[in-house]
Image (spheres, rainbow, N blue to C red):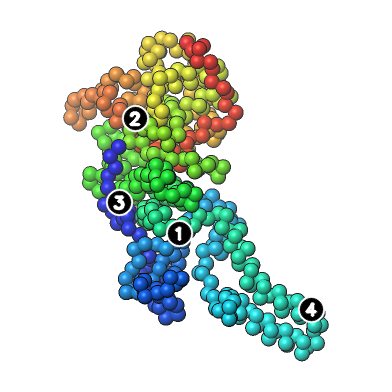
Amino acid sequence: MTIQAPQKAGTAQRLSPFRQRPKQWERNRSRAVRDGHVCSGSGCAADCEPVLIRERTGWGWIDWTVPADGSLPEQAHRIAVFTPTATRAQCLGLRWLARRPAHWIRLGPVAVRTATAVVAALTLLAAALAVIHRVPFDVVLPAAALAPLLVEHLPDRLDARAGENVRIIEAEAACRYLQRLAALHTGLVHAAAAGSDRYEARRAVEVGHHQLFDAADLLQRHDTRSASGELIARERLMLQLAVQTNQLVTPTEGDAPSARHDRLGVQQPLGPYPPGPRASVDHSASILLMKEESHMSQDSPEQPAREVYLLFAHEAYYPAAAQEINTSLVAAASLLHPRVRQPDGARIYDRLTRDRRPGEIVPLSTLTHELDGGARWPEVGNWEAVTADLLQLIQDCDCDALSLGLPDIARALVCAGPHTEVRSYDPAAGRYQAYGPAERSEVLVEVGKKLAWAEAGCALWPGDGLLVPGNPGERT
C-alpha cells in the first residue's frame, strides 16, 4: 500500500520542545542556566547529571536537556506516556507524577529534597513555639519527626502508585523512535483542535494515544530491533491517521474524497459511527491497519484476522434532525445474535462468510446474486426478517454498526447486483446516465474507508451471547 508523505506542518516528523510555546522554552532555559548546571558534553564529569526541562502534554510528558550553546535539543532525554483508559483518580495521580522534578540539596553525605529541608526548619520552629506554649513534649516530638519523613518519602510512594499507569522510556534508541510517534500524535492533537467539530479528528486522537501508549509499553519490554515489526505497523497507522486527519481538517484540491462530491453523489461523511473503544479492550493487540479498499485484504502475520461484514439497505430512519440513515453495515457475527431470527441468521452467516477475504464488505444484493438471483433464498433463510432484526439490534445498541446515509444512486448500486446497471435520467441534460460495476465498487471503497475510521483501534462489536456457527459439513 502506498502511503502519501505528510506535507502539513501538523504531521511533521520532528518534535521540538514547546513548539507551540517558544517563549515558555526560553523562560525555562533561562531559569535552568541561572539555577542549575548545564552539561557541556566533553567538559563535564562522567557522573554529570544534565539539567532537564519538563514539557507536560495531554498524553504524558517529555524531558529535554539544555544544550550549552543555546540551541534547541534535537533528542528527548525521556518520554512518558499516560494510559489512555485512566480513571478520574488515576488521572489525578498522573498529574502528580508529571509535576516538575524535585530539587535536591546536599547536607554533607546525604541529599534531601529542598521541600524536606524547608519543612524540617518550619517543624523545628513550630515545635519550639509549641514547647513555649506548654504543649506536651511527647506530642511535639513525634509530630516534629514525622513531618519531614512524610515529605521525604511520601512522594516516592505516590510516584510508585501512579507509575503503574504510565510508560517511561529513557533508552536512546527507544526514545528516538517514540519521539517520532509523539511528533505524529502531536500533529493529530493540533489538527483535532483546529477541527474539533469533526468526529474523525477526535477519534484519530483517541486511536493515536492508544498506539503511542502501546508502543511505549512495547519499547519498555523489548528493544527496537526485536519489536521492529509491531513498531512499524503502529507507525504506519499513525502516519495514515496524521495524513487523513490533515486532509479532513484542511482539505485542498486533489486531497482525499473527504471534501468532495463524486459523480455518484457520495458526500463525506456518510453517516454516524459506532461508539469508541471500551475500556476492557486489550489495545496492545489492536494493530488494525487502515483499509485502502474494502475488498482488499492485508494479510500479515502480525495483524489479527478481521471479520467479514454485511452491508444492507433498509427503510430510512432519522436519529437526529436532518440526518437520514438508510443503509447499515455490521460484523457478520451479528447474524449469530440470539435476537436475530434463527436458524435463518446462522445460515446466512454461513453463506456470507464462505470463501471471503478477511475484511471484505459483502452487500446483501451480492448474496442474492450468488443465490441464483434470489431463487434459492428459501433454502437459506428469510433475509427480510433477519435484516429487520439486525436493524432493531442496531437501534437498541445491542451491537455496533456503521450507519450510513447514502445518496440515491449510491444506495441503488448497493441494492443492485454486482453486474447490474443502474440508469438515472438527467432532465437538465435530457439524457440518461448509466452506472455499473465500476461505480458500485467505488461506493464500496468509500464505505470501506469510513469503516476503517470507525474500526481503528476497536473492531465492530457483534453483540453478546452469540450462537456457535453451524457445522461446515452441513452447509447448503
Closer to the eye: label 1 or 3: 1
Quarter-wise, where is residue 41 in the image? bottom left
Which residue is at a point 59% across and 60% down the rendered structure image? 160
* Mark earlier in primary sequence (2, 4): 4
Q: Position of residue 281 (x, y in %)?
A: 53, 41
Label 1 to label 4, Cα distance in Å?
45 Å
Q: Amino acid at mark 3?
A: Thr
Q: Residues within 10 Å of mark 1 (few under 14, many from 20)?
A: some
Which residue is at a point 81% across and 79% down the rendered structure image? 138
Q: Position of residue 12 (x, y in %)?
A: 31, 55
Q: Residues within 10 Å of mark 3 (few under 14, many from 20)?
A: some
Label 3 to label 2, Cα distance in Å?
28 Å
Q: Amino acid at mark 2?
A: Met
In terms of depth relative to the viewer, which is nearer, 337 or 353? 353
According to the picture, the residue beneath numbered tag 3 turns out to be: 250
Mark 3 residue element: loop
Mark 2 residue element: loop
Quarter holding the N terminus? top left
Q: Are marks 1 and 3 in contact (CB under 8 Å)?
A: no
* Mark earlier in primary sequence (2, 1): 1
According to the picture, the residue beneath numbered tag 1 turns out to be: 170
